[in-house]
Image (cartoon, rainbow, N blue to C red):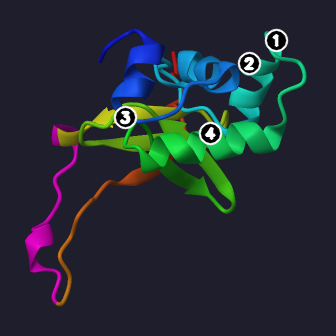
């Protein structure tokens, strides 16, 4: 991915603004899976007057432009992922941290056979805890 957020946004036809650039600098290159609150808190350091609604709307604009994917990881809990390659997710039940799991690590039965549907996307969201190590 191009590491110039201005060029990335322009390439997708997104009008540039200071707020959009600030959100892009954080969310497009993160290895984490930030929520709206995470992005808002990070961007507020440089733009204390940015509203949560502006961050929410900007993230949705980026999703619509194909720059991010929105992942529902719990009841009313959404995170954003800039990694658009096929992969799965594992949510640590103790910390809430979302981890990427390689596509090949989990065998998906034939998704082409879902009767009456053309499947456009498939991913597994797993939940678990780190194993306790016993001496």
Label 4 vs label 3: CA separation? 13 Å
Residue 45 circle label: 1
CB contact under 8 Å: marks 3 and 1: no
Instruction: Verify CB contact (< 8 Å) between mark 1 and mark 2.
Output: yes
| Count of numbered badges drawn on the protein | 4
- Which quadrant of the view contains residue 39? top right
Instruction: Please name the residue that numbered disc 3 is placed on.
Output: 12
Q: Residue at x 76, y 29 (%)?
A: 40
Q: Which residues are magenta?
A: 104-115
Residue 89 image-quadrant placement: top left
Instruction: For marks 4 and 3, give the one nearer the viewer.
Output: 3
Q: Nearer the viewer, residue 134 or 17?
A: 17
Ranked by sequence position, the earlier of labels 4 and 1 is 1
Q: Which residue is mark 4?
A: 58
Q: Is residue 92 visible?
A: no
Residue 16, image x, y percentages: 56, 25
Q: Cα distance, mark 2 to mark 3?
A: 23 Å
Residue at (61% x, 50% y) in the render: 78
Q: In the figure, is residue 97 to the left or right of 45?
A: left
């Amino acid at each position: 991915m191009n590491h110039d957020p201005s060029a990335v946004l322009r390439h997708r036809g997104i009008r540039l603004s200071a707020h959009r650039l600030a959100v892009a600098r954080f969310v497009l290159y993160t290895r984490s899976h930030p929520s709206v609150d995470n992005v808002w808190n990070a961007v507020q350091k440089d733009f204390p007057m940015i509203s949560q609604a502006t961050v929410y709307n900007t993230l949705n604009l980026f999703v619509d432009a194909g720059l991010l994917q929105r992942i529902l990881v719990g009841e009313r809990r959404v995170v954003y992922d800039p990694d658009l390659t096929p992969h799965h997710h594992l949510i640590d039940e103790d910390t809430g941290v979302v981890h990427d799991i390689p596509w090949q690590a989990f065998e998906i039965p034939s998704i082409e056979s879902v009767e009456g549907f053309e499947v456009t996307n498939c991913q597994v969201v797993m939940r678990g805890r780190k194993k306790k190590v016993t001496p």
